[in-house]
Amino acid sequence: MIKVLVDTDVLIDYSKGHNQILGVLLEKQDNNELELWINPVVLAEFFNDIHLKKKDVLEKAMEFVSLFRIAEIGKKTGLLAGEILRERKANFLGDALIAGTCISEKLLLATGNKKHFSEISGLEFY
């Protein structure tokens, strides 16, 4: 089974009616062609939206993220993220943790920000 971690930008674009790549991925998940994942970093970034102060918007967002499996961040991911940052392969802790999650859990990354991740060895994109 193909496993894909969806980056925050893809979630945000889809939820705002922009880029429909996630729509295709959700359909493939419905057809059991792949599994969609997020991690706590993606959750935190997605739920940082000021519009989520509205109860109805927050409820829709909670329902939306329930479509994804959660890849927890553990020791292996943390060590990989530290190495990525130490080697200056990523500029942001969030990106390093997302990349580390993908590498440690053998997930492909679906992102609109490939340039943020282009220097990271072992990371594969969807």
Image (spheres, rainbow, N blue to C red):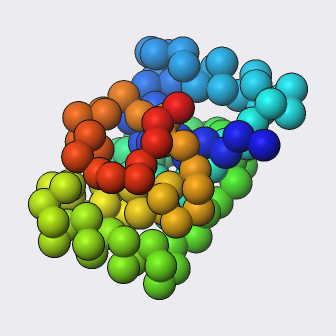
Q: Which residue is drawn at 36% across and 79% down?
A: 79
Image-based side of 58 in relation to 118, left or right: right
Find the residue positioned furthest to the right: 31
Q: Where is residue 109 in the image (x, y as percent from the top left)?
A: 49, 41
Residue 43, visible in the rendered structure: no
Q: Which residue is drawn at 19% across and 55% down?
A: 89
Q: From the viewer's side, name the closer residue of 66 and 125.
A: 125
Q: Residue at x 66, y 18 (%)?
A: 24
Q: Where is residue 14 in the image (x, y as percent from the top left)?
A: 51, 24
Q: From the viewer's side, name the closer residue of 120 and 64.
A: 120
Q: Where is residue 66 in the image (x, y as percent from the top left)?
A: 71, 49
State whether residue 122 is above or below residue 60. below
Find the residue positioned furthest to the bottom: 75
State whether residue 48 is above or below residue 9. below
Image-based side of 81 in relation to 53, left or right: left
State the count of labels: 0
Q: Which residue is drawn at 41% across and 53% down?
A: 122
Residue 77, visible in the rendered structure: yes
Q: In which quarter of the image is residue 23?
A: top right
- Which quadrant of the rendered structure holds the N terminus? top right
Image-based side of 81 in relation to 12, left or right: left
Q: From the viewer's side, name the closer residue of 112 and 48.
A: 112
Q: From the viewer's side, name the closer residue of 35 and 124.
A: 124
State whether residue 79 is above or below residue 81. below
State whether residue 103 is above or below residue 32. below
Q: Position of residue 35 (x, y in %)?
A: 73, 42
Find the residue positioned furthest to the front: 121
